[in-house]
Image: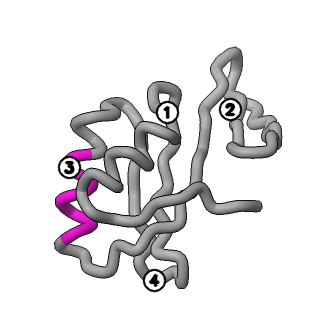
Amino acid sequence: MPFYHPIRTDLSRHLCVGNKSTVIEVFKTDVQTTYDAGGLLELLNARFPGNKVNFDLHDCDNILRIEGLQYSPEDVIFLMKQQGFHCEILSH
């Protein structure tokens, strides 16, 4: 079983598994419907393959969560804004 060691930084959360560091970022969005979330998931998964991407529309901040190694939070925000949605890093 791998040892998980969380490391906290000012903007993102890191989870170390062995010698790899996985970045976990949580965003506040204005996505309201499962239809919109589904379309955005397809787009985000195509743009950032190999990452875990999900929405929690039951949360008051309509959370977008991304976990992986190959993405930039700034690119996520830019892509969301291109699609007409507000997106910002959720502060801790």
Assess disc 3: are there few (<14), some (14-19) or many (≥20) residues with their C-alpha within 10 Å of its C-alpha: few
Which sits earlier in the primary sequence, circle 1 or circle 3? 3
What residue is at 46 percent from the left and 31 percent from the top? 71
Q: Position of residue 76 (x, y in %)?
A: 41, 44
Which sits earlier in the primary sequence, circle 2 or circle 4? 2
Which sits earlier in the primary sequence, circle 3 or circle 4? 3
Report which residue position mark 2 lands on: 1
Which sits earlier in the primary sequence, circle 2 or circle 3? 2
Between 20 and 78, the one nearer to me in the picture: 78
Marks 1 and 3: CB-CB under 8 Å?
Answer: no
Q: Main secondary structure of the magenta part?
A: helix
Report which residue position mark 3 lands on: 42
Q: CA distance from mark 1 to mark 3?
A: 17 Å
Q: Quadrant of residue 11?
A: top right
Quarter of the image that includes the N terminus: top right
Report which residue position mark 4 lands on: 58
Element type at marker 4? loop
Quarter of the image that includes the C terminus: bottom right
What residue is at 54 percent from the left and 84 percent from the top? 60
Q: Position of residue 77 (x, y in %)?
A: 44, 49
What residue is at 48 percent from the left and 47 percent from the top? 66
Q: CA distance from mark 2 to mark 3?
A: 31 Å
Marks 2 and 4: CB-CB under 8 Å?
Answer: no
In the image, which residues are magenta? 36-43
Which sits earlier in the primary sequence, circle 4 or circle 1? 4
